[in-house]
Amino acid sequence: MNKILSSAPGRVCLFGDHQDYLELPVIACAIDRTIQIIAEENGKDLFEINMPDVGQQRTILLKPVFSEIERGDFLKIALKVLQKRQIVPNRGYRLTISSNIPINAGLSSSSAFTIAWLQFLITAFSDRSFSPKELALLAYETEVIEEGSSGGKMDQFTVAIGDTIFLDTHTDRVQKFNDLKLNLVVGVSGLSKDTFGTLSHLKSNAWKAINQVKSQNSEFDIASTTVNDLNKNLELVETSLKPYFYAAVCNHDITQRALKTLLQEPLNTHVLGELMNEHHHLLKSYLKITPPLMDKMIDAANNNGALGSKIVGSGGGGCIVAIVQDQKQEEIIEAIKATGAADAFSVKVSKGAALN
C-alpha cells in the first residue's frame, strides 16, 4: 500500500470529568476537529515525519531501541506495543502530520495523535483488523499503561469509536448514541496545564477518601453508592479529603441523570445544560480546577444564552465547552473571546478514527 491517510478526531467530555480513573462512567463525544496523517512509502529503512503545524521534523528507525524511549514519546511507544502483537514495520514511510485540534487544551489531541498513528501502522504492516474498541485499548496501553500514567480510558475510547458514548470504564461497556444533534461551542483559554500532575493529585486524594470509607465499611462500593448515603459516608472521611469524595459521588449521580436524559426522545438540551452546570460547579468549587480566566469564560457563555457550560479535561487550563442553541452560537463565541480567551469556535459531534 503506497499511500495511507489516517485521521482521528478530538473529543469533549460532557459528563464525568475526573471519574474514569475511579472506574466510574463518563459521557463524551468526538468533535469535528481532527489530526491527519498522510503517509507515502519512501524506500528507506526509517520513518521521515514532518509536523508543519508545530515546525518539527524527526526520523524514527523501523526498529528503535525501546530501552531508550523518552516519556511521552507515543510514536515509539506505539511501535513497542504493536511489536508485542507481532506487528513490526518492514519498510519506511514519509509522513506529514497535521491537526486543527488545540494542543494541551483538554480536547485529547494526544489520544487523537496516538490513535491516528496506531491506525496507520496497523494498516501498513498488518493483515489483522482491529475494531474501534480494540484500537482504543491499544492506545490506552500506549498512553497510560506503558507510561504508568494516572489517566483513564475516556479519551481513547471516544476518539476511536466516535459519536457520543456512555462508557462504563470498569467493564469497558460502551453505549453509543449515533448522530446526536448537539450544538457545542469550545472556548480555548490559552493557559497551559499540567495534565499528569493534576490527574495524579486528584486521583490520589479521591482514592484515599474512598479507601477511608472502605476501611470502616467493607461492603462500600463507589460505583453503587448514591447521594442518599452521602452524609453518612462523609462522616468516615477526614476533613481535607471530604471535597474529593463529595465530588466523586455527586458527579457520578449527574452522569447517571445525563444518561437518562440522552435516552429520552426528543432530546432535552435544556436539561442537559442544567446538568452540565451542576457538573461544573463541582469541578470548580470542590476539585478547584478552574483558574479565574476560565471562570470568566464560563460566565460569559452562560450570561449570553448558553444552556450550560463546563471546563473540559484535567483542569488548570485548557478549554471549556458550552451547549448552545443555534441562534445564540456566534454571540456566545464572541463573548468568550472578549474575556481574553485565546480562541472560541463551534463544533459538531463527529465520527471516530478513520482511514480516508
Image (cartoon, rainbow, N blue to C red):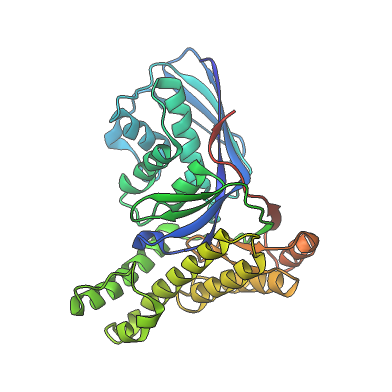
The number of numbered discs placed on residues in the rendered structure image is 0
Residue 310: which quarter of the image?
A: bottom right
Q: Is residue 95 left or right of residue 211?
A: right
Residue 299: which quarter of the image?
A: bottom right
Question: Between residues 245 and 170, which one lies in front from this camera angle?
Answer: 170
- Name of the residue lying farthest toward the top: 43
Residue 343 in percent (x, y) is at: 69, 57
Q: Residue at x 58, y 61 (%)?
A: 264
Relative height, residue 262 to residue 158 (above, below): below
Residue 31 in percent (x, y) is at: 61, 48
Residue 253: which quarter of the image?
A: bottom left
Residue 127 in percent (x, y) is at: 40, 20
Residue 175 in percent (x, y) is at: 47, 51
Relative height, residue 92 to residue 304 (above, below): above
Q: Residue at x 51, y 62 (%)?
A: 259
Q: Residue at x 21, y 73 (%)?
A: 219
Q: Is residue 55 visible?
A: no
Q: Is residue 18 visible?
A: yes
Q: Is residue 353 left or right of residue 171?
A: right
Relative height, residue 44 to residue 244 (above, below): above
Q: State which quarter of the image contains the C terminus.
A: top right
